[in-house]
Image (tube, rainbow, N blue to C red):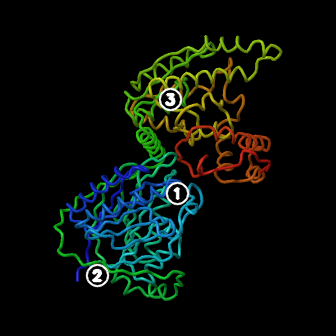
Amino acid sequence: MNHQIRIALAQTNTIVGDLEGNFRKIREYTGKAEKAGAEIIIFPELTIPGYPPEDLVLKQKFISDNKVYLNRLAETNKKAITIIGFVDFDNDIYNAAAILQQAKIAATHHKICLPNYSVFDEKRYFTPGKRPLIFEYNEIKFGLNICEDIWVPDGVTESQAFRGGAEIILSLSASPYFANKRKDRLAMGMNRARHTRTIVVYVNLIGGQDELIFDGNSFVVDHRGELLAEGRQFEEDFILIDLDVNELRDFRHKDPTFKLDKKEFNSKYEVEFIALEAPLEEPEKSTLLKRTDSHLEGFEEIYQALVLGTKDYVSKNGFTKVVIGLSGGIDSALTAALAVDALGSKNVIGIMMPSEITSETSTRDAEVLAANLEIRSDTIPIKKAFDAYQETLKEVFKDSPQDITEENLQARIRGNLLMALSNKFGWLVLTTGNKSETSVGYSTLYGDTAGGFAVIKDVPKTWVYKLCEYKNQTAGKELIPSSILTKAPTAELRPGQTDQDSLPSYELLDPILEEFVEKDKSVKEIIEQGYPRDIVKEIARLVDKNEYKRRQAPPGIKITHKAFGKDRRMPITNRFKT
C-alpha cells in the first residue's frame, strides 16, 4: 500500500501580540496549503501570540485572547490538518501546539523540554508538559514536538519513535539566529533522524523580534539523514513536500540495530496516542515545482541577518524613517548601508555634525557616502553649542584642566541633536557603536549611545570591516569609500585622536573579547593561551566596569553566540574578579 502524504511548512514572520495580524497570516498560508492539496500544514512555535511573548503570558487576557483566535482558526479549518503554536492555560501555563481538523481542536501537545539558558527563560513562564504526543493519520504515525523537545537527545523524539512508533516527526520551532546556526540546526536534525529512523519535518520562525533574529531555514530530512528540502534564510517561505513512509518502514524492518535501539531505549515518558479521522477524500494535488534552495554563508549571512533585524525592528515598532549621525567613520558607514538595504534610501537621513576638530577627510567621506547611498544628508555644526556649554560651565570648571569631560560634551551634544530630530520628525535614531567598543565602554553615555536601536551592537570591529568589504563587493563598486576602510579609526573628540590611543589593536582586542565575553574564559585561562597579561587584565577590567553603560544603551541585533543583553546579564554592582 502506498502511504504518501503531502505536508506544507509555513515559515512565517509573525509579530508578538498582533493576534489579529497573525491570524490573518495563518489563514493566508492555510489557504495556500489547501489549494496545493496539502493534507497537513505546520507553523512555527507560538505562531498565534508570537515568539517570545515574555511577560505578556502573565496577563490572563493575553492568554484568553490567543485562545479565542485558536478557536476561530479551528472553526475555519475544513480541509488540511493545521498544526499551530499557542499559549495554553489548564491550571498552569503551557507552550503548546494544537492539531486542528475538521472545524475542531483534535488534540494539544504541551512542550516538555523548556530551555532556560542563553536567551531563553521559558521556565519563568511555562510549566513543562508530561506526555509526548503521537497521532495517526492515513495509517501513518506522527510525533509532534516543539523546538527544545527535539534538541534534547534521548528524550521526547526517541520516546515518540521507539516507544510510540512515530515515523514522521513534526517539530514546531522558534530557534534564534547567530552566525553559522544553520549548520548546528541541520546537524541536530540529521542526527535525530538517523538515530530514530524517522523523517524529521522542522519548521522554524522567521523575522526580527527586539534583539533576536529568527532566520527560517526550515528543513525536512529523511531517515538516513539526507536533506530533502530546506527553507530560505531571512525571508518567509512556503515549502511543499510529498513524503512516502514505505521506504522508511522497509528500512526499519531490515535494520537489526533499529530493533535493538527500540528494545534497549528506556523512556522516562508515557506516550499519548490519538487517532485522527481518516480523510473523507483524496485532495486534488497541484504539481510540485522544483525548488532552487540555496543558503548563505559567512559575512553574506551576517549582513542579511542585520538587514532583517533592522527592517523588522523599525517597521514592527511603527517607524518609517531612521536618522544616523554620519561621522565619516566606518561604523556609521556600515550602519547607513544596512539601513538603506533594510528600508530604502528615501527612509534614511544622515546628519553630519562637525566640530572644529573634525577633519576635512571625515567631512568629505561622509558626504561621498551619503551621495553613494542616495540618502538625504544635512549638516549641523556643533561649535556654537559646544562654546555655549563651555561658557555655561566655565565658573564651576575654572580650577580644573580640560580632560575627557570636554570630549564627551561633544558626543552628548550630537546625541541631543539626533534625539531632537527624532522628537520633531518621528525618526528613529540608529546608534553606531560596535561590539568591541560596547564591551570595553569606549563610548559616551547619553552621547553616541543615545538612540532607539543599535544595529551593529553585537558586531566586533574586525567584522565591521569585513561587512563593509562584502557590501562593496556585492555592489560592484566603492559604495563605502575606500578611505573610510583604510584610515585609522577615531572618535575625533580631540586633535590627533585615534582609537588605539585608548585600546589595543582591534585584531588583538576582538579575540580576547571573544574568549572573555562569549566563551566565559577567565583572565588566567586567556593569558595561558598566549595573550599579553597586562592587556588581558585591562580588557577584563573594562568589560566588568562598563556593565552600567550597556544596561542604559538601546537594544541591538544579536548575531554572535553570546550577545550583551538577553544573552549575557551581569550584575552592575559586582566585585568578583575573573
Q: How many marks?
A: 3
What x and y, as percent, mark residue 563?
59, 48
Q: Looking at the figure, which quarter contains the N terminus? A: bottom left
What x and y, as percent, mark residue 161?
43, 79
Considering only order in the chain, which callout, 3 or 1, is on the residue closer to the N terminus?
1
Say which amino acid is labelled 2: Glu
Say which amino acid is labelled 1: Leu
The secondary element bearing badge 1 is classed as helix
**Residue pushed farthest front?**
61
Residue 104 vertical placement versus 455 (above, below): below
Q: Which residue is mark 3?
A: 333
* Of labels 1 and 2, the one closer to you: 1
Considering only order in the chain, which callout, 3 or 2, is on the residue closer to the N terminus?
2
Say which amino acid is labelled 3: Ala
The span from disc 2 to disc 3 (Cα, nearest Å) is: 58 Å
Which of the 4 quarters of the picture holds residue 540?
top right
> Which residue does the image show at 68% across and 36% down from the upper left?
441
Discs 1, 3 touching: Cβ within 8 Å = no
Q: Nearer the viewer, residue 155 or 83?
A: 83
The secondary element bearing badge 3 is classed as helix
Q: Which residue is mark 2?
A: 139
Considering only order in the chain, which callout, 2 or 1, is on the residue closer to the N terminus?
1
* Of labels 1 and 3, the one closer to you: 1
